[in-house]
Image: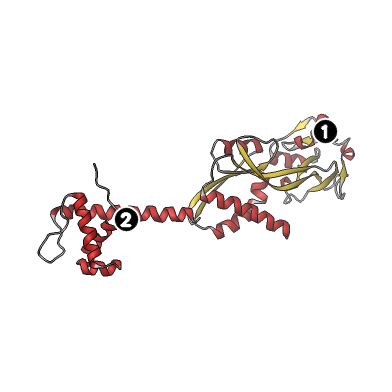
């Protein structure tokens, strides 16, 4: 049966050799000299070999002690590294969090969230990926990421969701379009115009505006391509406000007031699975950040 090596007696051996004797080691470790001697004696009994020469009044290592010394030093250093890293992880001073988010959230919300998070937790490494809502949910379920921020469509048993915010749906068109500049729109006012469907058009399904989707013959899922078509004046589309790219000066967003539709954005994690300390800190930070934004 292998002897159990406790760290504190090993520290005593290192202190005796580094400080030049039992008395100096006791002073260095803030312990009594008898306590140091007892710790060494107990360690020698466990090992079945003497570490220090007996009877000469000096702290001289035996050949066995000389063999043990670098190994004791390595073991103590490894213990201290593990203890430090574990404490850093538990106290959010270190770690890694993997997040996935739909593109509109990744580009519009995450910069502000990550700026404040990095400032508060500089030791945590962050990986952010973007993708459509179904992909984000699947990444969370498969454990590829711990957190997902996405549209909440259908509840899933494998996921735990926390609502974050509501994102209103509006009409996006070119700035010289007849609908541009309106305060709000009724869905019937969109009839007669070419509607370009996109991945969020499902929000219209089941609403009074569903026939607009049924009569649309254009579908573009990629936001870059969709924006190019809108700027070319080919048609109009409906988008959540967060998905509307305000930097495109030629496009404008008009709220759809009838029917009033919103996209619910939520935070996903795997049901029944604990988050790492880093991910738990990020989850709380996201909710606190958005709550502060609403209050402002």
Q: Is residue 70 above or below residue 178?
A: below
Q: Image quadrant for the N terminus?
A: top left
Q: Residue at x 62, y 54 (%)?
A: 113
Q: Residue furthest left?
A: 56
Colour pattern: secondary structure
Q: Position of residue 177 (x, y in %)?
A: 85, 44
Residue nearest the viewer, comparing 190 with 274:
274
Contact (Cβ within 8 Å) of mark 1 with mark 2: no
Numbered circle sitting on residue 84: none
The residue shown at (88%, 36%) is 191
- Residue at 56% over, 53% down: 281
55 versus 79 height, above or below:
below
From the viewer's perspective, is the residue at label 1 or at label 2 nearer?
2
Q: Position of residue 117 (x, y in %)?
A: 58, 56
* Residue at x-position 64% and y-position 55%: 288
Q: Is residue 179 left or right of residue 21?
A: right
Q: CA distance from mark 1 to mark 2?
A: 66 Å
- Quarter of the image for residue 27 reads bottom left
Measured along the vertical axis of the image, is residue 19 above or below residue 91? Answer: below
Residue that carries the numbered disc 2 in the rendered image? 77
**Image-quadrant location for residue 186:** top right
Residue 167 in view here = yes
Viewer-proximal residue among 159 and 169: 159
Look at mark 1 in the image and give the residue it sits on. Answer: 210
């Amino acid at each position: 049966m292998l002897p159990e090596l406790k760290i504190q007696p090993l520290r005593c051996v290192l202190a005796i050799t580094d400080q030049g004797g039992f008395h100096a080691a006791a002073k260095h470790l803030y312990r009594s000299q008898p306590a140091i001697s007892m710790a060494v004696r107990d360690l020698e009994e466990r090992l079945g070999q003497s570490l220090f020469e007996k009877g000469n009044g000096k702290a001289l290592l035996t050949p066995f002690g000389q063999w043990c010394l670098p190994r004791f030093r390595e073991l103590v250093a490894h213990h201290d590294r593990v203890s430090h890293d574990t404490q850093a992880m538990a106290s959010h001073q270190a770690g890694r969090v993997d997040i996935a988010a739909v593109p509109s959230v990744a580009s519009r919300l995450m910069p502000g969230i990550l700026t404040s998070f990095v400032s508060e937790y500089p030791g945590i490494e962050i990986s952010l990926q973007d993708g459509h809502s179904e992909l984000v949910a699947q990444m969370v379920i498969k454990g590829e990421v711990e957190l997902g921020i996405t549209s909440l469509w259908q509840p899933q048993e494998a996921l735990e969701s926390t609502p974050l915010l509501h994102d209103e749906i509006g009409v996006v068109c070119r700035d010289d379009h007849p609908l541009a500049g309106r305060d709000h729109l009724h869905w019937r006012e969109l009839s007669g115009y070419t509607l370009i469907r996109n991945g969020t058009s499902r929000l219209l399904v089941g609403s009074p505006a569903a026939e607009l989707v049924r009569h649309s013959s254009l579908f573009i899922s990629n936001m870059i391509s969709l924006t190019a078509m809108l700027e070319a004046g080919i048609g109009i589309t409906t988008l959540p406000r967060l998905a509307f790219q305000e930097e495109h000066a030629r496009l404008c967003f008009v709220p759809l007031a009838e029917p009033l539709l919103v996209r619910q954005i939520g935070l996903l994690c795997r049901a029944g699975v604990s988050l790492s300390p880093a991910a738990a800190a990020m989850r709380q930070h996201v909710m606190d950040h958005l709550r502060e934004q609403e209050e402002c």
